[in-house]
């Protein structure tokens, strides 16, 4: 065989590496110790420890990895364990700012004391309701109030009496009631009514009119100081009320002020409350008369809305730092919100309508967020960066800047922010944020990278078995036998696509065990054994295998053209992988190539119709480079060729078909048929070396099932890159066919090796001058390319001669 080494026919032992039962050292998982920690993520664990221990600004944590690797459960478990050893942060409450109610003040308290403050203020309100208005009904207060009223009435009465004396001198009587003062003429000491007054002579009536007008002026002069008397009386009454209120609330407030003497903020608030109560008690607590009197519950609600602090966040004493996971990181859920209530059609609010967010609850501790959800919410990412940069937690509406919030709102006092953000997301999002957001790297300096697989060692196998024991115990599942554990670990290596590694997607393993336990329950068996694992795998394949089964049926019926016997020129079977939901399966696809004289080059039909994605197009261009350097050293590569993936109507990406494409193209050039019993996968470089591809297990099994359905002949097989041999973890049905000689798997490292298998002939190795032996495949390719190039050269020469002959003699 050409190119140094021949294709390697793989033995059954090379197609999978099962777990050695003897190395497990137990019969059932009940014999194992529980597993503690995180499996096989040493790098991530070390990074997480560093990120939590580093308290400098900017050292927030991004946990990177794929779902199912245990990243979330580990982060929450580790943070809660660390948080217990840390200092409990301050409690915070909002209180009324009496001078400017739109700007509530924030008070910080020792951990665990916010609830006590709320209870104390609530008791204070109850005491106020018990004290007022009862204190205004006390005889001492009533006497002082009566004295003030009496002093005012005496001054008023003296003024009226002086006017009355002067009026009597002019035979005028003074009549007064609660509202008015009137003058009436008198005769012989008796007041005259209208009829009697009308009988008086005109001169007398006129004199009375003049005298009454004069008395009205006297009355006005006598009562000119009445507003001043009223003010003095009101001031005296107000001073009496304030003195009474102050004396009444002093025994209620002073113990609280003394109790919270160590917190200046609370003391200042209590002093401000004392001043505000001087007005509130009169307005809200003085008992109204009549049926409109307000009930006690209503009064308490009014006082609560005005004086009771609004709890922002409270922590249990010695509870450690908080660890908060916000599953729905909307703007309101993170930063809090200000609620409104409707009153007579208008939206109103106050400091007690402030609702805290996850940042308030996590302040002084850790906030865990999921990147995909976080970045999907409007305004949140930029607001979070602003909060981390300023280290302040400011509550505001994101709609205000857009002009969509027109009602009166609050501007609460900002709270100092000291929180470590832990974001959990995929690799794609991490690198996207790094590229697009210059602030991201400065704020999230710690990367916790979770591997998708781990080395398959005795320690990791033992740890995985212990982890299975722990999970089955926690979820109430039956124990596993050693054989079942070995089968689960073999499946884990299949998920990792490597014989010497295990998958770190622990959730997929636990899902399989849970489904196996369900089949065990149906069979009423005491332990989960290999048969239950196998049935669970088969059941899942049945549930998710509708699409693959339908494609296979179309191939068997001839709707999709795939040959598994015979030989054809310019055709070979490629191996592809399809992913539909959580189902991944291999599907063979025909690769065809045609060649004809011309200068169009190698045309990728998939790319021309915009179905070929960039990596696939790159593979075709590499193929062109290989063909030119391999076969066209002594003449130009002047051909027109077309390559297509037949009956493919969706997007095609990846370069794993390039090995099959170059073989089909060489077959078309050399007119040598290729065996259709083989299917091939692999990418190539410009030197014809075969490179590894993904999904090799699914690809082989997809072609095998088609051959099995049609009948295995022993001449069928798959050709894969030699570098993919460590990735083989094939199904037992494939292994049985290989052992029986009914199906073969070959590994190649160069195009010539694959070509030799497909053509069943020697490709031919070039000598030191670059010439291939006569009659070999490669020599026939060179001859065909030379023939096409010479024909094109002759055609060009004939065209030039014809043009020259057609010119006039004067131009020759």
Image: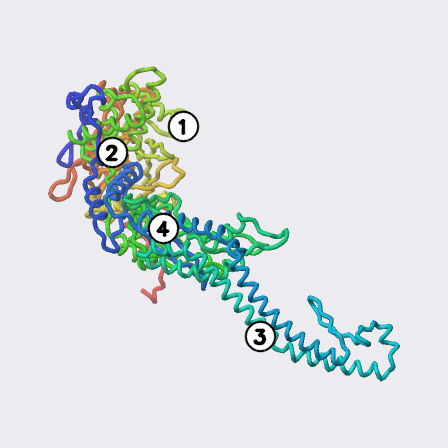
At mark 4, the secondary structure is helix
Depicted 18 relative to depicted 646: above or below: above
Residue in the image at 82% along x and 76% along y:
188
Residue 298: horizontal and vertical position, in percent?
54, 50
Q: Nearer the viewer, residue 311 or 163?
A: 163
At mark 1, the secondary structure is helix
Residue 23: horizontal and vertical position, in percent?
15, 23
Residue 425: horizontal and vertical position, in percent?
31, 45
Label 3 packing within 10 angstroms: few (<14), some (14-19), many (20+): few
Label 4 to label 1: alpha-carbon separation: 50 Å
* Residue 517 appearing in the image: yes
Q: Nearer the viewer, mark 1 or mark 2?
A: 2
Instruction: Using the image, tell me which numbered label, if any, was put on residue 503.
Output: 2
Label 1 packing within 10 angstroms: few (<14), some (14-19), many (20+): few
Q: Earlier in the sequence, mark 2 or mark 3?
A: 3
Label 2 packing within 10 angstroms: few (<14), some (14-19), many (20+): many
Depicted 254 relative to depicted 640: above or below: below
At mark 2, the secondary structure is strand
For the image, the number of numbered tags is 4
Q: Residue furthest left?
A: 768
Residue 221: horizontal and vertical position, in percent?
65, 80
Label 4 packing within 10 angstroms: few (<14), some (14-19), many (20+): many
Instruction: Using the image, tell me which numbered label, if any, was put on residue 360.
Output: 4
Is the C-beta separation of discs 1 and 2 under 8 Å? Answer: no
Q: Earlier in the sequence, mark 3 or mark 1?
A: 3
At mark 3, the secondary structure is helix
653 displayed left or right of 98: left
Q: Residue furthest front?
A: 188
Q: Which residue lies under the disc numbered 3?
A: 228
Q: Which residue lies under the disc numbered 1?
A: 546
């Amino acid at each position: 065989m050409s190119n140094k080494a021949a294709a390697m026919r793989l033995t059954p032992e090379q197609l999978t590496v099962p777990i050695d039962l003897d190395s497990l050292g137990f019969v059932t998982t009940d014999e194992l110790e529980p597993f503690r920690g995180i499996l096989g993520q040493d790098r991530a664990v070390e990074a997480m420890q560093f990120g939590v221990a580093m308290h400098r600004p900017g050292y927030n944590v991004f946990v990177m990895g794929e779902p199912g690797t245990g990243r979330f459960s580990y982060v929450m478990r580790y943070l809660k364990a660390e948080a217990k050893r840390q200092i409990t942060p301050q409690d915070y409450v909002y209180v009324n700012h009496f001078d400017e109610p739109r700007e509530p003040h924030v008070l910080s308290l020792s951990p665990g004391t916010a609830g006590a403050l709320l209870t104390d203020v609530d008791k204070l309100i109850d005491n106020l309701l018990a004290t007022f208005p009862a204190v205004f009904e006390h005889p001492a207060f009533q006497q002082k109030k009566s004295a003030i009223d009496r002093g005012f009435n005496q001054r008023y009465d003296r003024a009226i009496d002086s006017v009355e004396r002067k009026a009597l001198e002019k035979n005028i009587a003074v009549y007064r009631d609660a509202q008015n003062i009137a003058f009436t003429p008198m005769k012989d000491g008796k007041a005259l009514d209208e009829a009697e007054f009308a009988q008086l002579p005109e001169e007398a009536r006129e004199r009375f009119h003049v005298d009454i007008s004069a008395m009205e002026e006297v009355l006005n002069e006598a009562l000119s100081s009445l507003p001043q008397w009223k003010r003095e009386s009101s001031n005296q009454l107000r001073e009496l009320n304030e003195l009474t209120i102050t004396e009444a609330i002093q025994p209620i407030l002073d113990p609280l002020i003394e109790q919270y003497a160590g917190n200046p903020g609370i003391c200042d608030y209590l002093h401000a409350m004392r001043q505000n109560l001087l007005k509130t008690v009169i307005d809200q607590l003085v008992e109204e008369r009549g049926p409109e009197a307000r009930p006690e519950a209503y009064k308490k609600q009014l006082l609560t809305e005005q004086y009771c602090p609004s709890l922002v966040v409270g922590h249990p004493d010695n509870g450690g730092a908080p660890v908060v996971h916000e599953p729905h990181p909307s703007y309101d859920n993170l930063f809090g919100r200000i609620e409104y209530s409707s009153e007579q059609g208008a939206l109103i609010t106050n400091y007690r309508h402030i609702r805290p967010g996850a940042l308030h609850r996590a302040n002084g501790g850790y906030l865990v967020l999921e990147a995909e959800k976080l970045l999907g919410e409007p305004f949140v990412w930029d607001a979070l960066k602003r909060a981390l940069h300023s280290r302040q937690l400011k509550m505001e509406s994101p709609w205000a800047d857009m002009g969509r919030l027109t009602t009166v709102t609050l501007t609460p006092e900002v709270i100092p922010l000291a929180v470590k953000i832990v974001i959990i997301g995929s690799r794609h999002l991490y690198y996207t944020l790094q590229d697009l957001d210059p602030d991201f790297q400065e704020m999230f300096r710690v990367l916790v990278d979770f591997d998708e697989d781990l080395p398959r060692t005795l320690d990791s196998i033992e740890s995985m078995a212990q982890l299975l024991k722990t999970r089955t115990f926690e979820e109430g599942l039956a124990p596993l036998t050693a054989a079942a554990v070995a089968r689960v670990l073999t499946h884990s290596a299949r998920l990792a696509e490597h014989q010497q590694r295990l998958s770190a997607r622990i959730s997929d393993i636990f899902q399989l065990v849970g489904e196996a336990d369900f089949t065990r329950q149906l069979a009423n068996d005491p332990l989960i054994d290999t048969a239950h694992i196998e049935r669970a795998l088969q059941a899942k394949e049945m549930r998710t295998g509708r699409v693959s089964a339908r494609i296979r049926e179309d191939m068997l019926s001839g709707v999709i053209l795939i040959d598994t016997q015979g030989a054809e020129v310019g055709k070979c079977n490629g191996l592809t992988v399809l992913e539909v939901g959580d189902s991944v399966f291999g599907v063979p696809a025909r690769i065809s190539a045609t060649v004809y004289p011309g200068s169009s080059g190698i045309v990728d039909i998939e790319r021309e119709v915009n179905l070929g994605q960039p990596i696939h197009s790159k593979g075709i261009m590499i193929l062109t480079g290989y063909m030119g350097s391999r076969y066209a050293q002594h003449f130009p590569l002047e051909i027109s060729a077309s390559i297509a993936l037949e009956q493919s109507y969706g997007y095609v990406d990846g370069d794993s078909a390039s090995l099959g494409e170059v073989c089909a193209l060489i077959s078309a050039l050399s007119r040598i048929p290729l065996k259709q019993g083989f299917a091939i996968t692999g990418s190539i470089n410009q030197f014809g070396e075969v490179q590894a591809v993904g999904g090799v297990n699914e690809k082989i099994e997809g072609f095998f099932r088609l051959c099995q359905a049609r009948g295995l002949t022993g001449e069928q097989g798959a050709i894969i890159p030699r570098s993919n041999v460590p990735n083989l973890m094939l199904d037992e049905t494939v292994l049985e066919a290989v052992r029986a000689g009914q199906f073969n798997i070959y590994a190649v490292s160069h195009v010539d090796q694959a070509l030799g298998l497909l053509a069943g002939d020697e490709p031919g190795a070039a000598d030191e001058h670059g010439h291939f032996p006569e009659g070999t495949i490669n020599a026939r390719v060179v001859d065909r390319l030379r023939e096409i190039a010479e024909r094109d050269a002759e055609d060009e020469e004939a065209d030039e001669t014809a043009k020259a002959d057609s010119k006039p003699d004067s131009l020759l």
